[in-house]
Amino acid sequence: MNTPIRISTLALRHALPQPLAIDQWAEVRPLIDGRDVLAEIHPGGVSSCSRREWFGPAEGWPLAALEEPRCVELSNNDCYTGCCGGVFVTIHRRGDRVVWSSWQNTNDIRVPVPAAVHFDAAQYDAELKRAVADTGWEEPVDTAARLVTRELVHSGWFERWDCVADQVEPRREEPAGVEVYFSSRRKTSPHGVRFSFDLPVTRDVPAEEQVRRFIDRIASDDPRKTAEPL
């Protein structure tokens, strides 16, 4: 007699990094049946699924379940996993199920890893969408980083000026702020090749208002004229 496959529940929880962590975007930590599995098998590690990766189409999200199996990095030691190790899992959509299998713990191979975990695909997809829409955990700098990414990076604004957005980085250490890095596609640009904007973020003014002022200030002209060259 076949044993019924246990169907687990996925929940995603945001966790703010330490002020001096390498990645200043919030961690997105997976909870399986209410358990922080990364804390159990990689204590002290950080989730590799940072909030910076949860923009754009759903199929590009870090934990998106596709029909083609793919190996996903779940955690690291605030460092490159090829150097310091981490936790990996293969995510695969099988009909009405999502399966996490072939777990690897290169941080410490002595620690047992979970067996294959099965999720209901509808619950899984709904939880990913819920987590992306959830902003209740945000500090002002997180709100500002999200809005700047949406308004400048994913709007295609830099491309209109023959530039490309490199990265947006929240800065939690005081003075808190958001740093925007971009490059000119013209290697002979008279303004330079790489640039940055810095948006200080304070707690006494709504982050949305601060971002709107920032966007209004820079969006009317070639960004290379007002940004700081690197």
Image (spheres, grey):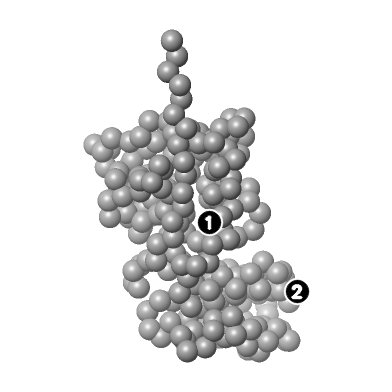
Residue at figure coordinates x 43%, y 49% from the top left: 30
Q: Where is residue 123 in the image (x, y as percent from the top left)?
A: 55, 42
Check disc 1 and give the amino acid type: Ala
Q: Which of marks 1 and 2 is nearer the N terminus?
A: 1
Check disc 2 and give the amino acid type: Arg
Residue picked out by circle 1: 131
Outermost residue toward the top in this view = 1
In-image side of 87 versus 100 (left or right): left
Q: Where is residue 52 in the image (x, y as percent from the top left)?
A: 52, 62
Residue at figure coordinates x 33%, y 36% from the top left: 113
Dot 2: within a 10 Å radius of its alpha carbon, few (fewer than 14), some, or many (20 or more) residues? few
- Above or below: residue 110 compared with residue 220: above
SS assignment at label 2? helix
Please name whichever residue, 221 or 39, is drawn nearer the observer in this view of the structure: 39
Q: Where is residue 183 in the image (x, y as percent from the top left)?
A: 62, 73
3D distance between C-alphas at marks 1 and 2: 31 Å
Whether residue 190 is visible to the viewer of this picture, yes or no, is no
- Above or below: residue 186 compared with residue 63: below
Q: In the rendered image, which quarter is residue 105 located in? A: top left
Residue picked out by circle 2: 160
Q: Which is more foreground, mark 1 or mark 2? A: 1
